[in-house]
Image (cartoon, helix red, strand yellow):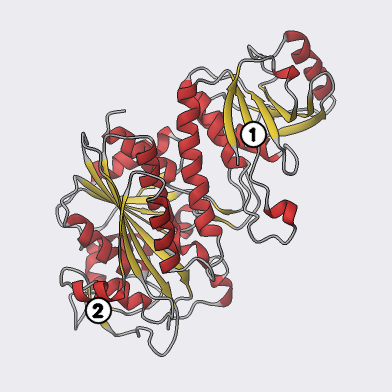
Amino acid sequence: MTSLNATSDSVSTIDADALIVGYDGDVTAHPQLTDEVRAAIAESAAALEPSSKAGSTVVLPGTGVSATRIVVVGLGDGSEGDLRLAAGAAARACGKQPSSVVVAIPTADDMTASAVAEGALMGAYTFNDYKSDDEVASYKGADWHIAGASEAALSRASILAAAVTGTRDLINTPPLDMYPAAVAEAAQGYAQQFPVDVRVWDVPELAEEGFGGILGVGMGSSRLPRLVRVEWAPAEAKSSVALVGKGITFDTGGISLKPPKGMETMKSDMSGAAAVLHTVLAAARAELPVKVTGWLCLAENMPSATAQRPSDVIRIYGGKTVEVMNTDAEGRLVLADGLVRAIEDNPDVVLDVATLTGAQGVALGTRTSGVMGHEEVRTAVVTAADSVDEAFWPMPLPSYLRESLDSKVADLRNIGDPMGGMLSAGVFLQEFVGDTPWAHLDIARPAFNDGSPWGFTTSGATGASVRTLFRFLETRAGL
């Protein structure tokens, strides 16, 4: 298993597969890197024309050091964000399946040291569970040695990186094996390791209590839906936060079938629920003095003889009715159930997280998520995101869009004006939160990278929103 350690030894004498050093126009000084070795590395690197651009790397043989190779990485402006990105990019340049890596990137304080360690662990992430090569499939990561880091910095980095990579693992697992009951079982398994309480609603309980959104979306699949509550409830909690995650373990679009290309990455439609689960676990590991209740709204959206149809009317938990105009606008239906139930417990604030709309990517691209809701909560989410260099952009909820959700036969319908689809989806969800302070995080495109790796972001699931959610909780705890 990957380990994260501090070292105060001279980094040039540590046996490792790779030594990572920084570059800001010259190889950067570090207390554990002698001037003589630093100068020798700089001289060797000069021939490869290294760049100070954050994440730019050149790789040298380990001449003059005990490491097999030396990775020289650009540090950009030296900010926390650039250091995190640089460490991630450098981690990806350390060769295949390194067993140990030493990082000698200079940092100013615990937060920047934590950022370097986070970036390294996130950038080094691999998902090999389904590889047939036994050596590849059994690889569990390197031992990481972060020169000069404090235990506090490494502890925070370990918690955050575990949350991000754990989220990635759930999403990257093929939907054949990751279905609603499997996610529920995973949550129950985590409850054996961490001080969290888990409750699972199966189909009879969902039907008895009136969770019409989750049941409606999941009724077309042979793998039946679940609702899962995961709660960290410390005795001295300063605040209570509910997190509601969309957990569509695979989304075909249902009867309103997606085109084939639109389905290829739809194992990622459970990204919100995966992020919520691992954020709650991170809060428990960090012992944050905040009560955090995660709601995982789990269903598989499949077409079949039992699937819901366009023009069906379903009753959301709490009684409000929705006419289903498009079965591919399913995420808002399961979230509506989750939001109403979460708010029933009177949290101080509620956030929902979802890969909700293709319109998010049209508006904001592949790396920037949208956030909308009550202004002060929306602002707090953006502030949290900015502090960890995760891109969230504040979006409005125009009141005029509500008219497009009017239904002739129900309280509202599940799709509105196609122009501004991300916003009308938020307006729909707003119908289910009442006066509770709330924000909606649409992470549709940033949640899954179907392109090349960059920085600490590997291909596949990214773990988008986890670090923002954790920082939001830290802020609620006064940290």
Q: Considering depth in this image, is 419 or 289 the residue closer to the camera?
A: 289
Question: Which residue is rendered at x = 26% and y = 72% of the image?
Answer: 206
Relative image position of residue 328 (x, y in whole percent): 41, 74
Question: Which residue is rendered at x = 21% and y = 37% of the image?
Answer: 235
What type is the residue that disc 2 sits on?
Ile
Report how far apart the C-alphas of labels 2 and 1 lie in the structure. Answer: 52 Å
Question: Which residue is rendered at x = 72% and y = 37% of the image?
Answer: 94
The answer, for residue 310, to whether it is visible in the render is yes
> Which disc, if any, is residue 108?
none
Q: Secondary structure at mark 2?
A: strand
- In the current view of this chain or complex, which residue is farthest to the top? 35
The C terminus sits in image quarter: top left
Relative image position of residue 79 (x, y in whole percent): 52, 25
Q: Of marks 2 and 1, which one's residue comes earlier in the chain?
A: 1
The residue singled out by tag 1 in the image is 143
Q: Considering depth in this image, is 192 or 392 the residue closer to the camera?
A: 192
Q: Nearer the viewer's eye, disc 2 or disc 1?
A: 1
Q: Residues within 10 Å of mark 2 (few under 14, many from 20)?
A: many
- Residue 304 vertical placement versus 107 (above, below): below
What type is the residue that disc 1 sits on?
Asp
> Which disc, if any, is residue 314?
2
Q: Residues within 10 Å of mark 1 (few under 14, many from 20)?
A: some
162 displayed left or right of 381: right
Q: Quadrant of residue 471?
A: top left
